[in-house]
Amino acid sequence: MTAPLNPTQDPDYVPDPGRWRILGVLLVTVFMALVGVSIVNVVLPSIQTGLGASQSDIQWVLSGYALTFGIVLVAAGRAGDIFGRGPIFIAGLVIFTLSSIAAGLAPDAFTLNIARFIQGIGSGLLNPQAIGMIQQYFRDGERARAFGLMGTAIGVSVAIGPLLGGLLVQIFGVENGWRWTFLVNVPVGVLALVLAFLWFPKPMLNGSPPARAAPVEVADPESIPLGPSWLPFAKTRHPGYQPRDLDPVGAFLLGLAVLMVLLPFVESRGSAWTWAMLPAGLAVLALWAWWEHRYKLRGRSPMVDLDLFRSAGFTNGTIISGLYMLGMTSVWVLVALYVQNGLGRTALEAGLVSLPAAIMAALGSHWSGGKVMEYGRRVVIWGILCALFGLGSSVLVIHWQTAFGLNFWWLLFTLSFVGTAQGLVISPNQTLTLADVPLDYAGSAGGVQQTGQRIGTSVGIAMMMAIAFATLAHTDWQTAITAGFGAIACVVLVALGVAVKDHRRRLVEVAGTA
């Protein structure tokens, strides 16, 4: 067993008595936002029927949200670090709620897609603040439990979204049922907004720095460590210091790079010029890194201090999350296609297949939140092994169904291991990855990690779908799913290698300090 994880300590930290109420607001909002994502996937045919939308319009209902969400993540996290996470969170909540109304009342596909673009911006503002506030208000075991509760909310939202979407379409009809999948966000958003104004500390609402210990007068500020030794700025700030530098050029360059990298993958019918944006986007990303480095040399505070990546824990954790999302996000798309197109089952049955997995994801997140401080990276390794077992056993069920007449509902059992993996990987990895990040960079660091996840998700879905459909063109659905799951397993194996490497590094560090 590894020694308990020891995150960065702030000697002036005093627990906020309202921190659990603050977490409640965060969980309600994240739950709403993620239900809004998962619910749309099952009502796309209803949208197409109700608005007479083209296939391209439907594609952009998903793509527009994904693009704007990914573009604003890091900049939104940095804005929260500087101006206070509460105001940015509330702004995102207002934007998300109002755009949900606009989407639900949209008279045509163009208006709906504009609303979805704006909804993605709102969600992009919300998510980094939630991570930053958990970093800010919780420490050690409490922080791990808070991330575990967030993982539980994610698991439940994934389970409820598709079922709620199907139910609303059934109640209100194919023509208008899709509208209620957006409008159900409104009462939840209003409730979360009221609670935020009631429970968030007031300094967070007027733009002043987040609640922290009062400044301490010291003769030598260099003697006060507020962060790990690998960060040059960790020993140059007293506890009351708050940077006021948004770095707009850095924000623009990174947003442009993310847009150029994501667009070829989210636009499934992209032309040759669209794919030419991919290498150009990588070039812009290199330009952004150069700018951030030069910006810091000029004595300014960059949007993302690249020295964050000198932390092996942060770098390895970001790689693990990106690889995991690159692979595992595609599982549910492939399963839905197989159940409906391969087996001729209904959309409701396709949603029910994933229900036990979502429940196990919620339970796994709750359990791992209390254990990650004790077992460290081992929890993530166990989760990845569960994912590999779930993939392999699901392939066996699919083939035995054809060979021996095995009931396809055995997928309920095998895919539950995939859900368990989600609970053991995502939230614990987030806790470990951000453990040593100073509070001044908690939001932007969380945004960096989530941007990696967003890129991994978009690239992974495009890759795995291409592999599955290329196989399907020459064989059958069973072989196509096997090829897709095999490719996913290869990516997840790489993530496992990084996790094992990071675990061994931590063991060496513990042995060195013993």
Image (tube, rainbow, N blue to C red):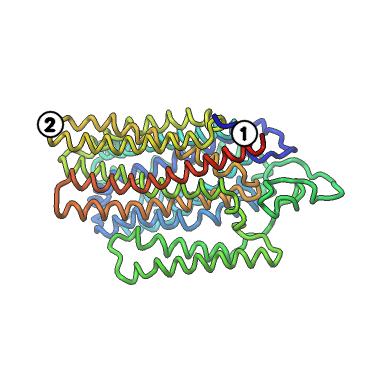
Q: Which residue is at the far right?
A: 219
Residue 167 location, quadrant: top left
* Image position of 100 (left or right of 245): left
Label 2: how many Cα within 10 Å (few below 14, some 14–19, many 20+): few
* Image position of 125 (left or right of 198): left
| Residue located at (16% from left, 40% from top) | 343
Is residue 43 visible to the viewer in this orientation of the structure?
A: no
Q: Is mark 2 on a helix, strand or loop?
A: loop
Q: Is mark 1 on a helix, strand or loop?
A: helix
The amino acid beneath tag 2 is: Gly
- Front residue of this view, candidates 320 and 367: 320
Q: Quadrant of the C terminus?
A: top right
Q: In this view, does 118 lie above or below 357?
A: below
Q: In this view, does 352 lie above or below 482?
A: above
| Residue located at (79% from left, 51% from top) | 222
Question: Mark 2 or mark 1, which has the lower sequence index?
Answer: 1
* Image position of 198 (left or right of 218): left
Is residue 150 visible to the viewer in this orientation of the structure?
A: yes
Label 1: how many Cα within 10 Å (few below 14, some 14–19, many 20+): some
Q: Where is residue 399 shown, x and y percent of the image? A: 18, 37
- Front residue of this view, candidates 460 and 352: 460
Q: Where is residue 351 shown, x and y percent of the image? A: 28, 37
The amino acid beneath tag 1 is: Asp
Measured Cα–Cα span from mark 2 to mark 1: 50 Å
Q: Are marks 2 and 1 in contact (CB under 8 Å)?
A: no
| Residue located at (29% from left, 58% from top) | 57
| Residue where numbered disc 1 is placed | 140
| Residue located at (56% from left, 36% from top) | 195
Q: Where is residue 501 shown, x and y percent of the image? A: 49, 44
Q: Where is residue 170 shown, x and y percent of the image? A: 24, 37
| Residue where numbered disc 2 is placed | 405
